[in-house]
Amino acid sequence: MYIIIAGAGTVGYSLAKALSFKHNVVVIDKDFDKLNKISEDLDILTIHGDIEHPQTYSRLDIQEADLYIAVTDSDEANLLSTLVVEDVVYVKSKVIRLKNDGFLTSKVLEKLSINYAVFPNLTTAKKVKALLDFPKANNVKYFHQTDCKLVSIRVDYLENHRYLISDILDEKVVAVGVERDKNFEIVEDNFLLQKKDLIYLFGEIENIEKIANKLNSSMPNKINKIVIFGANELSQKIAKELVGKGIEIKLVEKHRELCKEALHNLNGEVTVINSSYDDHYLFEEEGLDQADMIIATYFNDEKNIVKCIEAKEYGVSKVVAVNNDKDYYELMHMLDVIVVRGSKAGAYYSILENISSSLIVTQRHYCGGKAILFMRRIYSKSEFVGKSTNKMKISGARVLLLRDKEILELTTDTFLQEGDVIVLFGSIDKKEELERWIYEL
């Protein structure tokens, strides 16, 4: 594909790096320094120019592009550029990043023929909300093809010090990976669990919850009180998602103007604490140590880590940090901090997954990008209905068949039926092999 990326910031750079292996990519930006970094690191074309000006695109010397991705920090620039680019180049598909989720209910995206829009702050807020609904979880992923979820649980309690996975699971839940000592591994039922393992379970949530209670004793069974550190746009979005859940929410911020803004935007439904100092005694003075969960939402990952450590010292077991810089992901995991993708990382993965998915196959990343899954539903007109896959299992991957609320192992003598869902799990280094397998069957 020929792909135009408008914006050379963190998201644009990451997308260019990921997509340039297979596609022709060009990046456009007004910032010389950002473009120079891309040119030094990647073998792709860069253009210095204003994405809102038609003359910029005339320098591409092409008449047609497969994909246009607008990911600058300006909603206005991103939206306008999707219109301006088509004054010069015919674009088959358009993807955009937006901060203002008011466009979700607007007809603007439809009028601009935008195929996919990602609202990263809203996506992050919904991920935090999922942690409220499933208190033992580190992360929860949903899928439109099935009611099954992918849930990660930190193992901190083993009655016999060690468990074989087969000792704790039944046919309703499957273990599809374990992260241990920074490494991810696809596991089978004879895998021996250890404390501090992060295990990934696939199944319906009520069945996963029963297993989670066996593996984790430190996380709360229910969330009644939440503290959010920070009152930026993301913090307010998270608070708004949690309001109305019957829980007590406190938002802590040192900047008075952000406090006023939060009070106004959240209609007084959240207690906003204006703290002019970063002092751990605040936990005692404001009763923050009574929280069931704290969420650190600053744009500085080090600050988020410090707040989570402070909360742990005061006995808060469920501590969540927004991860803005992927270099801090491993450190957060090592410190038993639950990691939620920040807006830039969330935008990157959402766009990449959307581009890589199709009407036939859905692709999702998990375990901080170390693992990947592919999901394919067998529709009534599929050529595979009534046929077996005749494909051998991929080494180091897990292949499941979802049929009539059952989770089965897919074998070469399994005959596919309408409504079946095939799910393929593997490490990211096997991405191309897994993708080829699921498409070719």
Image (cartoon, grey):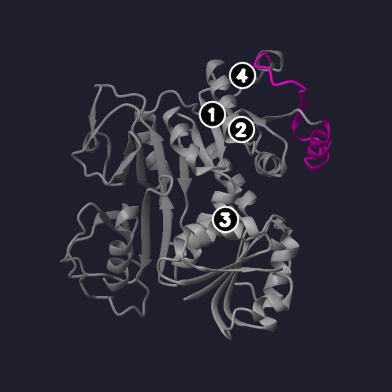
- The secondary element bearing badge 2 is classed as strand
Query: Looking at the rendering, which quadrant does residue 236 occupy?
Result: top right
Label disc, if present, on residue 319 of the rendered structure:
1
Foreground mark, 4 or 3, reads 3
Quarter of the image that includes the C terminus: bottom left
Residue denoted by label 4: 290
Label disc, if present, on residue 296 of the rendered structure:
2
Q: Foreground residue, 61 or 392?
A: 61
Query: Disc 3 residue type?
Result: Val
- The secondary element bearing badge 4 is classed as helix
- Name the residue rendered at 37%, 25% in the picture: 156
Measure how far apart labels 2 and 3 are at the Cα level.
22 Å
Measure how far apart labels 4 and 3 are at the Cα level.
37 Å
- Name the N-terminal-most of marks 4 and 2: 4
Residue 209 is one of the magenta-drawn residues? no
Judge whether 409 appears above or below 354 on screen: above
Can I make out residue 112 in this image?
no
Can I make out residue 368 in this image?
yes
Q: Foreground residue, 350 or 42?
A: 42
> For mark 2, does the 10 Å Cα neighbourhood hold few (<14), some (14 to 19), or many (20 or more) residues?
many
Residue denoted by label 3: 11
* Relative side of 143 to 53, left or right: left
- Name the N-terminal-most of marks 2 and 3: 3
- Name the residue rendered at 45%, 60% in the picture: 18
Query: Disc 2 residue type?
Result: Ala
Q: Foreground residue, 227 or 136?
A: 227
- The secondary element bearing badge 3 is classed as helix
* Relative side of 328 to 21, left or right: right
Query: Looking at the rendering, which quadrant does residue 372 occupy?
Result: bottom left
